Image (cartoon, coloured by chain):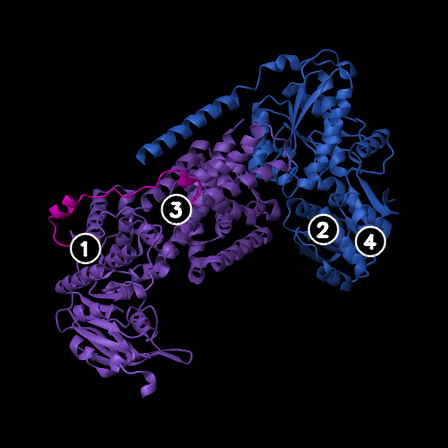
Chain colours: A purple, B blue
């Protein structure tokens, strides 16, 4: 009942689904893969030598090289202008590209128009499966590498990924290019198996098939596309085998089955299998680690006491007519713990967004660790040593606590993907170092033992702590904490205060935004008070506590308002 | 996790082995019973003759596949009423998907099917028929009109006339009848069938010395042709030649008449469908359709077919049904010739078909394994196809 071609099409379907998986892991929805595949297939079938002259396998390999290059190159060309697009906009842009390719191929002389071109059949089932194994191997090795984690982080929260020092544009483009190359690979294999290469076989339906295969199989684990392809290619075969009469019933049942899978297995078929959890190192291993504080990871030299860390001159930010920040002068030096307080809406978050490079000032200049945030990209500001937490937790929800912190350690870790592909022991060592480092960061904020819990499953307080651990993991010189104690009781807040103190001892400069004034008074060496976007007071905790303007603006006037 | 992956791989491997095993064990066995005694009408074959048809019953080409299925079933029914040979017809759906087409051909080749009919579309034919050729299973194409189908190998036959057999005659007849000098050509360029039809059309027009004022292309999915037709009208042609499918033909003809284009509209095989008159109504009057099947023919086979089809399915057959019906009849002819339903006997029998009366007229299979029978140029008159003289 099942024939040779079923096995080949399972392999081909899975390879095509991997080209969707390649971008879905980075949170991108692209529908252009059918376009890459058809361009690659037509080019390769035209340029590659005939199997009669050079033998089957060499001809196929040459065609694959051509096809993958065409796919990758096209992805670069398409990716450069479209990588700024998100979600459904990217989907539409890439779909438009695929349609343009289809029309182009129909109207070109060398492609044979709608009647297509005939291609010798070369692909044998074993070839398709060997190639599928290589592609699956690629993604298997990619997932737990620094590159793979960065892509997952981008998928979960792009802004946070940026703030952790990940070059989001570059990573998105490289994911897109690998999607293009794999789609090209698929196109070539398809052409060299089905004998007739016709543009109609690379239409909208093909793109949807690939996407559905990847999603039904599961787009967060590397074997998802394979499961999806087995499932979808088997549906018609099984229906035929059990004797459901040919006709509309079959596609109807197939649709129904897919609906059920999506409804009850939102993570795809792959979620039927237990998710891989990072094996943890025991606490003793952390203590026994001989290689110093960062265990052999890149280490930063923090600015010494008195050296300039942040220098803001006349900084301002307008949203339309609203002055969120106005004329802010602030000078922070190495080792200081600065508290930034002010009533709600005073412009505190706007200010730290400008310092960390997330938003551009509309006036004035800012210099942070020798960079101009707002002009330099966010990940470059992070690379210079700025790390931050967010007022509203921006964790990578579906990643474990440990993985969250490991993404935070993106800047101190080394790239491991290519070395993992080759099974180099040094990659394993580097990954281990990063795990140790991340575990240490978790321990430092009091999250030891929660390493394998998904970030979204943590309690609110633990999520706040995880944000701090993640920010710490990049070994920052300037740590910005945006309301870290929100939702903590006073015992926890005291512990946090102690932690901040010990971090300052390590030479970190800390900018703390907090509503818990008691904690700020206790922790900070200097306090800046904002109101209506302007600095209304700066000074030691004692000076601030006795400043009448502050008392009136922030702590509330002692006298009733109507008395004035 | 490691164990899980391992189990998964092992299970997949075991599954693969099991499936390959059950794929290959059918095949032969009953072959002996497929050879009978007697010849021609006296032939008696004990075993049922397995005939497999891979048609597009769902997907883009479903409307053609449906007609073909009707034609085949009707023919099998008629043949099984006759003494001697019974046919076990299996109609399978390729979903207008080359993957399914290939898989079906492999299945038929592997399960001992004597002869395979199909697939519906020429593009799928190029993808699937080589499998039968490699396995030595005769194939009878009943709707593939593209050039090169039978060149794929000596096991591939067809009873459908190619574009090259139908369109030149259509062009010649209409040029002569209407005295055409300047024409417009329209075709959908994203469909293999209509594109190859256009190519023949263009070369025939050139041969006839007709000037093509303009060649306009559209997509097979288009339903609004007003802009193109306005352009065509402004060129003031003597006629409009169209290579399109019936889905395009109906709105195109209707809109042309709405825009006041009164010149003849001349179409090919794609137009040869009674839907043209039912759906386009008045507008279809005067449309010229060159086709492989003369639905108005009063030869006894055709008259019987029309009546039986109408009784069975409650509608008029189209060319796809007629060609499918004829296909089954030709297979019966081939089987009875040597009184054997073995693959090579059918192959030989199909090759020997000569001057056989059929729904399509007197039909022969030539040395290129292509069919030869009279094509027809029809014109719609009073809501009916009549032969254009």
In three-dimensional space, the C-alpha distance between marks 3 and 1, rounded to whole angstroms, equals 30 Å
Q: Where does residue A210 sit, x and y in percent of width and height? A: 49, 45
Q: Chain for mark 3? A: A
Please tell me if label 2 and label 4 are on a single chain: yes
> Taking B190 as reference, is A485 left or right?
left
Q: Chain for mark 2? A: B
Q: Residue at left 17%, top 58%? A: A299
Q: Is residue A277 magenta?
A: yes
Would you say the residues marked 2 and 3 are in contact, meaning their CB atoms lie under 8 Å apart?
no
Q: Residue at left 73%, top 54%? A: B185
Which residue does the numbered mark 1 point to in the structure image?
A: A444
Q: Where does residue B83 sit, x and y in percent of width and height? A: 77, 16
Q: Is residue B160 magenta?
A: no
In three-dimensional space, the C-alpha distance between marks 2 and 4, rounded to whole angstroms, equals 14 Å
Which residue does the numbered mark 2 point to in the structure image?
A: B248
> Taking A550 as reference, is A191 left or right?
right
Please tell me if label 4 and label 1 are on a single chain: no
Examine the rendered structure and indicate whether residue B200 appears above or below residue A4.
below
Instruction: Say which of A91 and A347 sits in front.
Output: A347
Of mark 3 and mark 1, the one earlier in the sequence is: 3
Element carrying mark 3: loop
In three-dimensional space, the C-alpha distance between marks 2 and 3, rounded to whole angstroms, equals 44 Å
Q: Where does residue A51 sit, x and y in percent of width and height? A: 47, 37
Which residue does the numbered mark 3 point to in the structure image?
A: A220
Q: Chain for mark 4? A: B
What's the mark number on residue B283?
A: 4
Element carrying mark 2: helix
For the record, the magenta segment spans A267-294
Tell us which disc is closer to us: 4 or 1. 1
Report which quarter residue B313 is drawn in. Answer: top right
* Quadrant housing the N terminus of chain A: top right
Q: Chain for mark 1? A: A
């Amino acid at each position: 009942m099942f024939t040779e071609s079923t096995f080949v099409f399972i392999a081909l379907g899975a390879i095509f689904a991997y080209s969707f998986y390649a971008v879905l892991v980075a949170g991108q929805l692209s529908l252009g893969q059918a376009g890459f595949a058809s361009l690659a297939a037509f080019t390769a079938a035209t340029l590659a030598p005939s199997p009669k002259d050079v033998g089957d396998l060499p001809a196929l390999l040459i065609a694959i090289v051509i096809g993958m290059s065409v796919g990758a190159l096209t992805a670069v060309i398409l990716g450069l202008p479209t990588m700024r697009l998100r979600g459904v906009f990217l989907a539409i842009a890439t779909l438009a590209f695929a349609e343009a390719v289809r029309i182009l191929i129909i109207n070109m002389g060398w492609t044979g128009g709608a009647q297509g071109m005939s291609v010798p059949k070369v692909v044998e089932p074993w070839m398709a499966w060997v190639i599928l194994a290589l592609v699956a191997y690629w993604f298997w090795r990619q997932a737990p590498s620094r590159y793979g984690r960065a892509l997952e982080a981008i998928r979960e929260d792009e802004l946070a990924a940026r703030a952790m020092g990940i070059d989001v544009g570059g990573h998105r483009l490289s994911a897109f290019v690998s999607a293009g190359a794999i789609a090209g690979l698929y196109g070539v294999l398809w052409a060299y198996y089905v004998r007739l290469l016709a543009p109609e076989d690379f239409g909208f339906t093909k793109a949807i098939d690939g996407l559905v295969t990847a999603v039904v199989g599961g787009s967060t684990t590397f074997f998802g596309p394979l499961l999806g392809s087995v499932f979808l290619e088997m549906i018609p075969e099984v229906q035929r085998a059990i004797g459901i009469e040919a006709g509309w019933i079959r596609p109807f049942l197939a649709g129904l089955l897919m609906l059920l899978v999506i409804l009850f297995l939102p993570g795809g078929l792959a979620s039927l299998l237990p998710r891989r959890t990072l094996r943890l190192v025991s606490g003793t291993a952390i203590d026994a680690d001989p290689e110093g504080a960062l265990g052999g990871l890149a280490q930063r030299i923090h600015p010494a006491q008195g050296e300039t860390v942040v220098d803001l001159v006349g900084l301002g930010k307008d949203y339309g007519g609203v002055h969120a920040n106005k004329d802010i002068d602030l000078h922070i030096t190495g080792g200081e713990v600065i508290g930034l307080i002010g009533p709600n809406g005073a412009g505190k978050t706007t200010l730290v967004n400008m310092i960390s490079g997330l938003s551009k000032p509309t006036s004035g200049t800012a210099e942070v660790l020798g960079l101009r945030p707002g002009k330099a990209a966010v990940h470059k500001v992070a690379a210079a040593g700025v790390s931050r937490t967010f007022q509203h937790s921006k964790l990578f929800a579906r990643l474990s606590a440990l993985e969250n912190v490991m993404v935070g350690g993106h800047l101190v870790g080394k790239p491991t993907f290519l070395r993992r592909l080759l099974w180099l022991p040094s990659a394993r060592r580097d990954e281990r170092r990063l795990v140790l480092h991340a575990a240490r960061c978790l321990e430092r904020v009091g999250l030891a033992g929660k390493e394998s819990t998904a970030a979204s499953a943590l309690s609110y307080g633990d999520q706040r702590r995880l944000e701090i651990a993640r920010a710490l993991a990049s070994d920052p010189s300037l740590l910005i904490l945006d309301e870290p104690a929100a939702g903590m009781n006073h015992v926890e807040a005291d512990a946090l205060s102690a932690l901040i103190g010990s971090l300052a001892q390590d030479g970190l400069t800390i900018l703390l935004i907090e509503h818990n004034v008691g904690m700020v008074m206790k922790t900070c060496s200097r306090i800046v008070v904002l109101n209506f976007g302007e600095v209304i007071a700066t000074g030691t905790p004692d000076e601030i506590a006795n400043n009448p303007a502050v008392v009136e603006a922030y702590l509330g006037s002692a006298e009733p308002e109507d008395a004035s | 996790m490691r164990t899980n992956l391992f189990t998964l791989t092992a299970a997949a491997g075991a599954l693969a082995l099991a499936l390959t095993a059950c794929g290959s064990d059918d095949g032969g066995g009953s072959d002996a019973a497929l050879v009978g005694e007697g010849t021609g009408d006296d032939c008696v074959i004990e075993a049922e003759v397995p005939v497999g048809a891979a048609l597009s019953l769902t997907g883009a080409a479903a409307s053609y596949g449906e007609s073909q299925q009707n034609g085949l079933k009707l023919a099998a029914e008629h043949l099984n009423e006759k003494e001697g040979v019974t046919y076990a017809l299996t109609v399978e759906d390729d979903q207008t998907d080359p993957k399914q087409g290939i898989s079906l051909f492999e299945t038929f080749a592997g399960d001992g099917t004597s002869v395979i009919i199909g697939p519906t579309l020429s593009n799928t034919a190029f993808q699937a028929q080589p499998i039968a050729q490699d396995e030595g299973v005769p194939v009878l194409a009943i709707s593939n009109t593209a050039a090169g189908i039978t060149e794929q190998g000596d096991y591939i036959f067809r009873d459908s006339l190619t574009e090259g057999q139908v369109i030149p005659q259509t062009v010649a007849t209409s040029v002569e009848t209407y005295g055409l000098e300047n024409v417009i050509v329209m075709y959908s360029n994203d469909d293999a069938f209509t594109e190859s039809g256009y190519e023949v059309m263009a070369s025939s027009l050139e041969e006839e010395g007709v000037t093509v004022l303009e060649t306009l292309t559209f997509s097979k999915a288009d339903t609004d042709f007003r802009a193109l037709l306005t352009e065509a009208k402004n060129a003031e042609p003597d006629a409009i030649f169209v290579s399109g499918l019936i889905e395009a033909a109906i709105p195109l003809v209707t809109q042309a008449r709405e825009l006041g284009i009164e010149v003849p509209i001349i179409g090919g095989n794609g137009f040869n469908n009674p839907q043209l008159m039912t759906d386009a109504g008045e507008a279809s009057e005067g449309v010229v359709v060159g086709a492989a099947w003369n639905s108005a023919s009063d030869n006894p086979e055709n008259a019987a077919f029309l009546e039986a089809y109408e009784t069975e399915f409650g509608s008029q057959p189209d060319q796809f049904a007629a060609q499918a019906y004829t296909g089954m009849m030709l297979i019966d002819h081939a089987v009875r010739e040597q009184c054997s339903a073995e693959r090579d006997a059918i192959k030989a029998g199909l090759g020997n078909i000569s001057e056989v009366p059929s729904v399509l007229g007197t039909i022969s299979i030539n040395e290129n394994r292509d069919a030869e029978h009279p094509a027809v140029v029809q014109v719609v008159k009073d809501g009916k196809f009549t032969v254009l003289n």
